[in-house]
Amino acid sequence: MPELPEAEVVACQIRAHLLGAQLNDCMVGRADIVREGLPTLPWYRGAMLEDVVRYGKSVALGFRKEREVRYIVTELGMTGLLLFHATQTKHPQHVHVRLSFTGGRESELRYWNPRRFGRMSLLNRTGLDTYRARRFGVDPLTVSREEFVCLLQAKRGRLKPLLMHQQVIAGIGNIYANEILFRTKLHPNREVNRLREARMTVLYDTMQSVLREAIACGGSSVKDFFAPDGTEGHYKNHHLVYGKEGQPCPNLCGRIIRRLQSERSSFFCPACQSNRFSV
């Protein structure tokens, strides 16, 4: 499932290849793939792509026509991909939206989504602000250390579900929550209100480091993720615990990585990530 690093890679590639291009046509194969704003689709024809921004795990394309700016926001969901024209897909029948451009380095951007858990939304500025407020908490790459600590201090409950709660911290999913917690030596079920401030700052620094390293590696192509140009992300080669059940702990502590089944599978070392109270 694409998470923040994968969405950031997608946004960067679209920005590099299509910024300043004109949208000539937008073909929607399934009306139910557009969550809201479908009647406004004709407005986008002839508009210029002036901005590409990531919000959590979503990518927003900002189009300008005369003095107005409107947005096409794409949720990548479980299996959603944004792909350039030359990128091959295994099942082309799952391309549900095609955006045709002139004046860019690419001629087409396609939305491929076989399971259709993600959707597109066509929004004006007010609609985008409402969409963001409803769906996204703080961004883990831009939130300050102080804001992050205050956020955690105001919360209760288990740590891993909190990291993955999109209305609290936007963009972290199961893969990166596992990796962040292992590197911070925190158990997935650790109670947030039992963390001391010093450990919260370590968690913040580790979160930033893991996400930025993953972006530099093109994300994690664990199952179906490909960047718009068809390249795979190689951060999966740097995973220490995700999907490593039964393998020796990479910290060489002598224990075996275990899998904890809860809302989503958690991979952890029972020695390095003890759930006993500690600093």
Image (spheres, grey):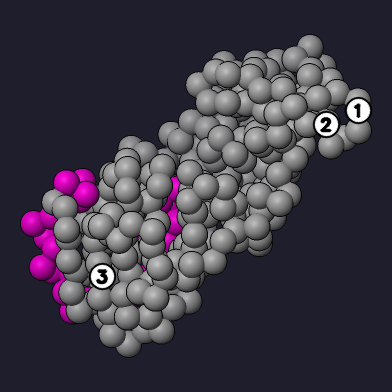
Q: Between tags 3 and 2, which lies in front?
A: 2
- Gap in Å between the C-alphas at discs 3 and 2? 46 Å
Which residue matches tag 3?
A: 99
Residue found 31% across the figure and 65% down from its top: 110
* Callout 3: SS: strand
Residue 203 in the image: x percent, y percent?
72, 35
Which residue matches tag 2?
A: 249
Q: In the rendered image, which quarter contains the C terminus? A: top right
Residue 153 in the image: x percent, y percent?
62, 24
Report whether 16 appears left or right of 83.
Answer: right
Q: Which badge, 1 or 3, comes first in the chain's sequence? A: 3
- Judging depth in this view, the residue of 145 and 9 nearest the camera is 9
Q: Amino acid at mark 1?
A: Cys
Residue found 52% across the figure and 32% down from its top: 164
Do labels 2 and 1 touch, CB within 8 Å? yes
* Callout 2: SS: loop
Q: Which residues are magenta?
A: 32-60
* Callout 1: SS: loop
Most extreme residue toward the top is 276
Please give the label number shown on residue 253.
1
Residue found 78% across the figure and 31% down from its top: 247
Do labels 3 and 2 touch, CB within 8 Å? no
Please tell me how crowded label 2 is: few (under 14), some (14-19), or many (20+) other residues with Cα within 10 Å. Answer: many
Report whether 69 appears left or right of 155.
Answer: left
Q: Amino acid at mark 2?
A: Cys
Q: Is residue 192 above or below residue 143?
A: above
Please tell me how crowded label 3 is: few (under 14), some (14-19), or many (20+) other residues with Cα within 10 Å. Answer: some
